Image (cartoon, rainbow, N blue to C red):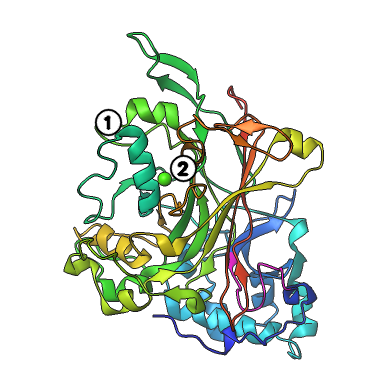
């Protein structure tokens, strides 16, 4: 598992001034990785690391001879804006990069003068997907979400009997994954309608889902399951993930094979991958409530019980088009915590591969919607509005049951613990456009 070392020291300061601001998501203790280029340019996307409100251009730093040889070598294959080759090298390469940048960006580092030339302002860049996602799988680890949604569909039988035994998931679609700033057309499709024939048209019940996504680092050979003890060695890091969902399409199509067109028109992630190393101080015990079944042995391990959970505060914010036009900031709709997930990241990896299924570098595993236990902690509008029956009232007087055209949904997340520096994930923003054609 992940060691806490001097790269997590709360006293570390950076010569990049904005990284020392208490509210930044990207202090020197975080160092998340993404790909970027100058906004509006036709440059090739390239890997970078966020520090305060700047980004370190890793290829520029490498080419200027500012990275140790081992670290410079580990970036080979990432020149075309995809991190898969770096991800495939596993935790060792990631830790070496983290250490090199932690030292080079510290106050007093002799690298400051030279490294300054490899810094850009985040305000001046744009992002792309950080890697080629071969396969995207969406799990359902939020038991409060599963129960609340189950109640809407099956009042007498909200949680199906397999839920507490199987980390439920389905295979999603990677082609429509996008990075924060993504906008998409309101999907059209079939809904149940009121007469004998279904209706066709734009979704009237468009929703978001608050999730985390785990990127796979090293994969496994087909036929060789990943054991719980090694599962997190195969994980690169986490991003925020908005699994946009058309509830009316979903309700009509989901039986018997599960979600299809209700989910595959767009899914948005945050641009910076927060590495498992950066999350080390925020690990928590993974537990089962008394009376719930203990996991089967292939889903159990001592290390998972000790620190399989991760304490990450998750939030959904909404900015309607009229709020944007009036210059009003987004409004927070809810908060929850990833600690409440029923299954851990390691259990998702172990379960996904237990039948021999091979994971590959850059694969993305969604956590499922992370709702909290309390009323008002729903990670989707479906829950917050009780299936559209209880509208959410915004400060400017607008109401929402489901999303309107022009709405921008922003997911945010942060980790805090006494004695450690707060880190965040940056924004995961996406905007709904009217139905029609691009
Ligand atoms: Ca989902």
For ligand 1, the image quadrant comes to top left
Q: State the quadrant of the N terminus.
A: bottom left
Q: Secondary structure at mark 1?
A: loop
Left or right: 318 in relation to 168: right
Residue drawn at 26 percent across, 68 percent down: 226
Pointer 2 residue? 175
Per the image, is 25 magenta? yes
Q: Is residue 359 left or right of residue 298?
A: right
The stretch of residues the image draws in magenta is 22-33
Residue sitting nearer the eye, 71 or 386: 386
The spot of residue 263 in percent (x, y) is 43, 37
To which quarter of the image does residue 248 belong? top left
CA neighbours of label 2 inside 10 A, class few (<14), some (14 to 19), many (20+): some
Question: Where residue 313 appears, x then y in whole percent?
Answer: 54, 62
In this image, 412 relative to 223: left or right?
right
Marks 1 and 2, how far apart at CA: 24 Å
Between 257 and 383, the one nearer to me in the picture: 383
Residue 102 position within the rendered picture, expressed as x and y whole percent measured from the top left:
63, 83
User: Would residue 135 be seen by someone viewing this image from the given angle?
Assistant: no
- Give the number of marks: 2
Q: Which residue is mark 1?
A: 255
Majority secondary structure in the magenta region:
loop
Q: Quadrant of residue 37?
A: bottom right
Of labels 1 and 2, the one closer to you: 1
Q: Secondary structure at mark 2?
A: loop
At a point 28% along the width and 76% down the height, the residue shown is 229
Badge 1 density bin: few <14, some 14–19, many ≥20, Cα 10 Å: few
């Amino acid at each position: 598992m992940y060691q806490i070392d001097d790269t997590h020291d709360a006293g570390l300061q950076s010569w990049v001034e904005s990284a020392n601001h208490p509210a930044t998501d990207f202090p020197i203790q975080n160092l998340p990785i993404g790909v970027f280029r100058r906004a509006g340019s036709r440059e090739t996307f390239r890997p970078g690391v966020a520090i305060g409100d700047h980004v370190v251009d890793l290829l520029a730093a490498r080419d200027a001879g500012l990275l140790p040889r081992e670290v410079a070598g580990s970036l080979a294959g990432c020149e075309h804006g995809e991190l898969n080759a770096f991800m495939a090298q596993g935790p060792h390469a990631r830790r070496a990069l983290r250490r090199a940048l932690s030292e080079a960006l510290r106050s007093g580092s002799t690298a400051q003068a030279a490294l300054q030339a490899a810094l850009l302002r985040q305000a001046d860049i744009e992002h792309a997907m950080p890697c080629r996602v071969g396969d995207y799988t969406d799990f359902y680890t939020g038991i409060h979400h599963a129960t609340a949604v189950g109640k809407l569909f099956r009042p007498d039988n909200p949680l199906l009997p397999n839920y507490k035994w199987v980390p439920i998931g389905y295979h999603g679609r990677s082609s429509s994954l996008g990075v924060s700033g993504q906008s998409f057309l309101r999907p059209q499709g079939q809904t149940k309608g009121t007469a004998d024939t279904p209706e066709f048209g734009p979704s009237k019940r468009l929703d978001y889902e608050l999730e985390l996504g785990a990127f796979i680092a090293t994969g496994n050979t087909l036929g060789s399951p990943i054991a719980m003890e090694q599962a997190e060695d195969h994980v690169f890091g986490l991003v925020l993930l908005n699994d946009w969902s058309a509830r009316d399409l979903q309700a009509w199509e989901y039986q018997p094979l599960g979600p299809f067109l209700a989910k595959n028109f767009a899914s948005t992630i945050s641009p910076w991958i927060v590495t498992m190393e950066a999350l080390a101080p925020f690990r928590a015990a993974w537990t089962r409530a008394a009376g719930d079944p203990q996991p089967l042995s292939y889903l159990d391990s001592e290390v998972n019980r000790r620190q399989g959970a991760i304490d990450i505060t998750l939030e959904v914010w909404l900015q309607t088009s009229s709020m944007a036009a009036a210059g009003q900031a987004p409004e927070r709709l809810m908060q929850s915590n990833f600690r409440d997930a029923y299954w851990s990241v390691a259990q998702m990896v172990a379960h996904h591969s237990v039948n021999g299924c091979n994971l590959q570098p850059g694969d993305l595993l969604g956590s499922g919607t992370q709702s909290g236990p309390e009323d008002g902690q729903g990670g989707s509008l479906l829950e917050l509005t009780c299936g559209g029956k209880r509208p959410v009232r915004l400060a400017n007087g607008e109401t929402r049951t489901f999303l309107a055209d022009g709405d921008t949904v922003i997911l945010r997340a942060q980790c805090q613990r006494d004695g450690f520096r707060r880190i965040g994930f940056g924004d995961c923003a996406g905007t709904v456009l009217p139905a029609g054609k691009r």
